Amino acid sequence: MAPLVQHWEALVEELLSPLHLPRHPIPMARFGLLAMRSAQGLAEAWFTGPRARGFFAGLAAHSIMPLDKLPTAAFGLMLGMLGHAVGWPLPQGGSQQLTTALVAYLRALGGELVTGDASGLGG
């Protein structure tokens, strides 16, 4: 991630802007060549251990696409770059707080959370 993190501000500016000729073509080309790959392909080529590959897969899963599809690597790269550059956002009290807040909001709207086997078949 180091080459991307080194130019993270320029990359974020470029990637979140409307289409235009890049003002930072070298970092953009480096990002683009990696980003157009599938997350699976990039993880297998770039990371040696299962933990690093799994972590990258988790980042890339934010694409909500199968990780063997193009360009899912872009999501993992962007989130990984930002996490390394500015920190990893975690809710105070842990990730359970996200679920707790969402369930509280659902209940405030009159909703109900039902857990367990919804098929009625058991098991």
Image (cartoon, helix red, strand yellow):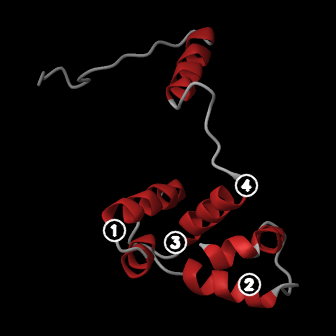
Q: On the image, which quarter does residue 117 sit in?
A: top left
Q: Secondary structure at mark 3?
A: helix
Q: CA distance from mark 2 to mark 1?
A: 26 Å
Q: CA distance from mark 2 to mark 4?
A: 18 Å
Q: Earlier in the sequence, mark 2 or mark 4?
A: 2
Q: Secondary structure at mark 1?
A: loop
Q: Indicate which label's residue lies in the foreground, 2 or 1.
A: 1
Q: Secondary structure at mark 4?
A: helix
* Location of residue 107 in the rendering, given as x and y in whole percent from the top left corner: 56, 11
Q: Indicate which label's residue lies in the foreground, 2 or 3.
A: 2
The residue tagged 2 is: 27
Query: Does residue 30 appear left or right of residue 64 in this picture?
Result: right
Circle 2: residue type: Pro
The residue tagged 1 is: 49
Q: CA distance from mark 4 to mark 3?
A: 20 Å
Q: Nearer the viewer, residue 88 or 38?
A: 88
Q: Secondary structure at mark 2?
A: helix
* Location of residue 55 in the rendering, given as x and y in whole percent from the top left corner: 44, 57
Badge 3 crowding class, 10 Å Cα cut-off, few under 14, some 14 to 19, many 20 or more, is many
Circle 4: residue type: Val
Q: On the image, which quarter does residue 51 sit in?
A: bottom left
Q: Earlier in the sequence, mark 4 or mark 3?
A: 3
Q: Residue at x 63, y 74 (%)?
A: 2
The residue tagged 3 is: 73
Q: CA distance from mark 2 to mark 3?
A: 16 Å
* Location of residue 38 in the rendering, given as x and y in whole percent from the top left corner: 45, 75
Q: Earlier in the sequence, mark 2 or mark 1?
A: 2
Q: Earlier in the sequence, mark 4 or mark 1?
A: 1
The residue tagged 4 is: 86
